[in-house]
Image (cartoon, rainbow, N blue to C red):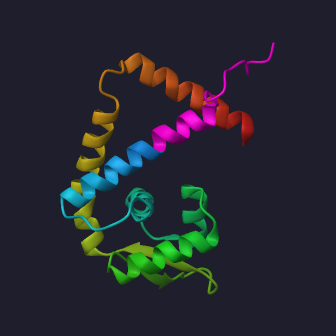
Amino acid sequence: MPNNQFRRGELYSFITGMASTAIARRLQKNFKQEGIEITIEQWSVLYHLWKKDGISQQELCTASFRDKPSITRLVDNLEKLKLVKRMPSPTDRRSNLIVLTDNAKKLHDQTMEIASRTLNEALEGVSASDVERAKVVLQQVYDNLK
């Protein structure tokens, strides 16, 4: 039996999109209150670089689910902020690696603390088992469509 019986306004993509947007807006507000002048999009690129520094722009595209023009723009802006540098790839002359600067490395702990606080705020009143179940369901939806 299909599992798509829902009323208007209950489309899962709208619900998850609204929640995602609300969290992003609050995180942006919390960054601003702490004097961190980067966008959530820029932070998400830094997040992937904190996990693995010195990856190509193509790897950033894959990791962040963004297209090449978006990543190019984000990296350009992060370079202007002196948070990343492009370095020639030692194995591929056509490719640059994106490398964190010391300034970006210094932002890691502070921004992760703000992100953690923001997520805790968003999940207030939600049980750990409900969070875990939501993760499982959303992962299954993603896996079904990739």
Query: Closer to the camera, 21 or 75?
Result: 21
Query: Closer to the camera, 140 or 49?
Result: 140
Q: Could you tell me which residue is drawn at 29 percent across and 42 percent down?
A: 118
Q: Position of residue 29 (x, y in %)?
A: 28, 54
Instruction: Answer above or below: position of 20 versus 8.
Output: below
Instruction: Answer above or below: position of 91 versus 15.
Output: below
Answer with left or right where residue 12 lies relative to residue 33: right
**Quadrant assignment, res 90:** bottom right
**Quadrant assignment, res 119:** top left
Residue 76 belongs to the span the image colors magenta: no
The C terminus sits in image quarter: top right
Q: Could you tell me which residue is drawn at 61 percent across and 30 percent down?
A: 9
Q: Which residues are magenta?
A: 1-20
Q: Seen from this angle, which residue lies furthest top?
A: 1
The N terminus sits in image quarter: top right
**Quadrant assignment, res 131:** top left
Q: Position of residue 99 (x, y in %)?
A: 41, 74
